[in-house]
Image: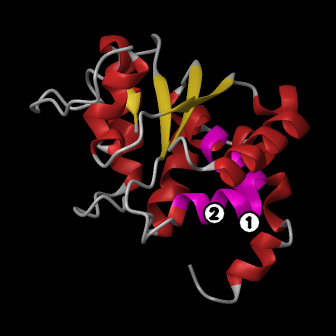
Amino acid sequence: MPASTAPRLLEGEARGALQRARSIAIDELIEIIERSGLRGRGGAGYPFAEKLRAVRRNAQGGEAYLVANGYDADPGSPLARTLLTRNGANVVRGVAIAAHAVGATQIYLYLHPEAIEARAAAERAIGEMGAELGVPIEIALGPGGFMGGEESALLAVLESRRAMARQRPPYPAAQGLRLRPTLV
């Protein structure tokens, strides 16, 4: 994101983004996201639009989930905590847009148990937006420790199992939470 964009977003320019996203066709929305160049931050830099398409394709109109991983296991790199604390509303809006794009029926915002300020900011944002979000959002806390934020381990935690990474494939986009397509 260009440096000049960040202050405008923090000042609330993104307020109408969710309504705008819902007013256009899903394929067009995903194309816009693709043109933005948005990529995952998990190391591989996987194009976000491709993840959206995979979850949508695998769900085939059935139940799908979105898990927003705000766990931040590395205390020296609290990126998600910082984003949520500074502007939880924009993070929650972005998550709702992604949920709309994949047809998710439930959103989980997964946080480290020590992310107290980030959790409070997210709770405020969810409370203020309410029904505008269109999909229920549940804040879920991981167990603490480094492994709790790994993609497959956090899905295990959400299923009331130990935070253990699983071998892939299958990837969450095909078989994630409760064996349904899941955008993480």
Question: For the C terminus, which image quadrant?
Answer: top left
Q: Does 124 appear above or below 177? A: below
Mark 1, secondary structure of its residue: helix
The circle drawn on residue 141 is none
Q: Magenta stretch containing residue 90, yes or no?
A: yes
Q: Quadrant of residue 174?
A: top left
Q: Amino acid at mark 1?
A: Arg
Q: Which residue is the extreme one toward the bottom?
A: 4
For residue 94, side relative to residue 66 (left or right)? right
| Cα–Cα span, label 2 and label 1 | 5 Å
Query: In the image, is residue 147 part of the stretch drawn in magenta?
Result: no
Q: Main secondary structure of the magenta part?
A: helix
Q: Quadrant of the N terminus?
A: bottom right
Label 1 CA crowd tier, 10 Å (few <14, some 14–19, many 20+)? some
Q: Amino acid at mark 2?
A: Leu
For this rendering, which residue is in front, 12 or 163? 163
Q: Mark 2: few, some, or many residues within 10 Å (few <14, many ≥20)?
A: some
- The residue sitting at 42% across, 71% down in the picture is 76
At x 42%, y 21%, the residue is: 158
Mark 2, residue position: 83
- Residue beneath disc 1: 86
Q: Looking at this view, is 129 or 16 the one in front?
A: 129
Image quadrant in which you'd find residue 136: top right
Q: Can you say whether 159 is above or below 101 in the image? A: above
Q: Which residues are magenta?
A: 80-96
Indicate left or right for 25 with 134 as reference.
Answer: left
Q: Are marks 2 and 1 in contact (CB under 8 Å)?
A: yes
Q: Residue furthest right?
A: 128
The picture places residue 86, in percent across and down from the top left corner, at 74, 66
Secondary structure under the numbered disc 2 in the rendered image = helix
The residue positioned 55% from the left and 29% from the top of the image is: 140
Figure label count: 2
